[in-house]
Image (cartoon, rainbow, N blue to C red):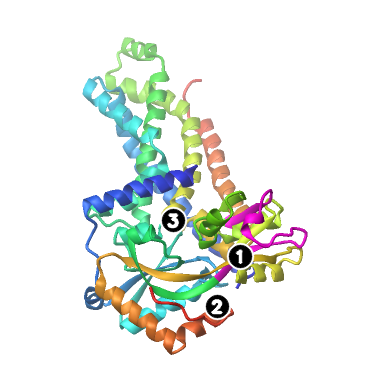
Amino acid sequence: MLKHLSRIVSAVLLAGAVTAGPALAADLQEIIAAGKVRIGVPVDVAPFGSNDANNQPVGLDVDMANNIAKALGVELELQQITGANRIPYLATDKLDIVIAAMGATPERALQIAFTSPYAALSVGVFGPDSIAITSADQITSETIAVARGTTQDLLLTELAPNATIQRYDDDATAAAAFISGQAQLLATADIVAKDLMEKNPGAELKPKFLMQFSPCYIGIQQGSPELLRWLDTYIHVSQLDGTLSALSEKWIGTKLPTLPAI
Amino acid sequence: MIRELGPNDIVYLLEAARWTIALALIAMVAGGVLGLVVAVLRIVAFAPANWLAIGYINLVQGTPLLGQLFIFFFGLPLFGIQVGAWEAAALALSINASAFLGEIWRGSLQSVSPRQWEAGAALGLNYWQRLTSVILPQAVRISIAPTVGYLMQLVKDTSLTALIGFIELTRASQILSAATFKPLQVYGLAAIAYFVICFSLSRLSQHLEKRTHAAR
């Protein structure tokens, strides 16, 4: 109920942000003049961003943020964000850039601007051999655990209208629900499922079906055309010279496919 | 990708617990001072002040703390006031505490029988003497249990600030759980930390109740 409430509150506040006229976004030249860029990354979405054994943030998104600050020639001000506050953070000018494994949707694009995709991961539904399903519409009585608001949540909601979808705060709690038997299926990224199987010998997470190879986009405040153009150029060049693919191999374990520009 | 839960992580949780305690302490002190003002405005013999206090209490008690947190954190920047998660959390919790503490203390003051005031007057004590030597010592003793009960609630309410990204015990647990995929163990440790904080408060309350020298 609290989650629901927080969504309403943030929607109201965002509506207020639009009508009250939000603070002007810092465009490329202002960022360069200020000598620092404020980038938000997740710390609860492995492998994109999580805390390592010394509790320092690491992950694909963290590397990406470092690379971008270096290419801009400015200092990086790294901010930890949550799935719920990443868009409000941009709308209220607390951040210049959000790199948080974000999927692009037309609804989200009403509030923030998206660059071309910089990474992609395949998301699917996983479960034991005893459940014989091969597509989303075959799910009827089984309960699926999923992290709320993620690409896999949006896809499942659309593809499996008859399924019982249990939404959790993050992948870790969704996985715990699956492992403890609260849910029979788990919708997550294939890298997460693979890793979970290795770490938990009892967990049977066989791929049932893959839903989508879903690209991740960088989000920025609206009204910064120069910054948007620069980031798109940076992503384009990094895709051509193999930097992005190397990042993908390092963190997700697969080469980056050719992603169409936005 | 998924890593093990290590001894460093216990340190990380304990460090985050400092912020839970600091936030609760700030809200207790600032909310307590403001709560005194609210309690006084609520009972002073001047109707507009009473209305103001009643309106304030109803507004704060009638809206969810999470909504208040969001209003301070995401709302103030719309008016050009930049606040961090820390300031917004301290502000929202202090205001929330002031309404609840003000109401608890108002009730405690009024629960001392009016005859005590009359008895004091009969002994020739002036208003100030009656308040500080007769009424307050009894009111304070009455208020200790509900005050500490509320403070324990406040300690646990600080966990809501995780939603605006303030890294206290709950948010640190979320981060740790996401890295290790061990939510049961991580949140279990966090629950123990909350228990230790709240249990200390309740022991303090018992100690204070024994120490007040008012008649019972």
In the image, taking residue B71 as reference, residue B212 lies left or right, namely right
Quickly name the residue at label 3: A84
Instruction: Indicate the quadrant containing the C terminus of chain A: top left, top right, bottom left or bottom right.
Output: bottom left
Up-down relation of residue A120 to residue B20 (above or below): below
Quickly name the residue at label 1: A124
Q: Nearer the viewer, residue B129 or A9?
A: A9
The three-letter code of the residue at mark 2 reads Trp
The three-letter code of the residue at mark 3 reads Ala
Q: Nearer the viewer, residue A44 or A191?
A: A191
Q: What percent of the width, then of the height, locates residue B199?
A: 58, 43
Q: Earlier in the sequence, mark 1 or mark 3?
A: 3
Separation (CA) of disc 1 from disc 2: 18 Å
- Range shown magenta: A122-146
In magenta stretch: residue A140: yes
Quickly name the residue at label 2: A251
Separation (CA) of disc 3 from disc 2: 24 Å
Up-down relation of residue B175 to residue B24 (above or below): below
Q: Image point 62% across, 58% down: which residue? A: A136
Q: What percent of the width, then of the height, locates residue A200?
A: 72, 66
User: Local crowd at mark 1 within 10 Å, few (<14), some, or many (≥20)?
Assistant: many
Q: Secondary structure at mark 3?
A: loop
Instruction: Tell me if I can see residue A47 in this picture.
Output: no
User: Which mark lies nearer to you, 1 or 2?
Assistant: 1
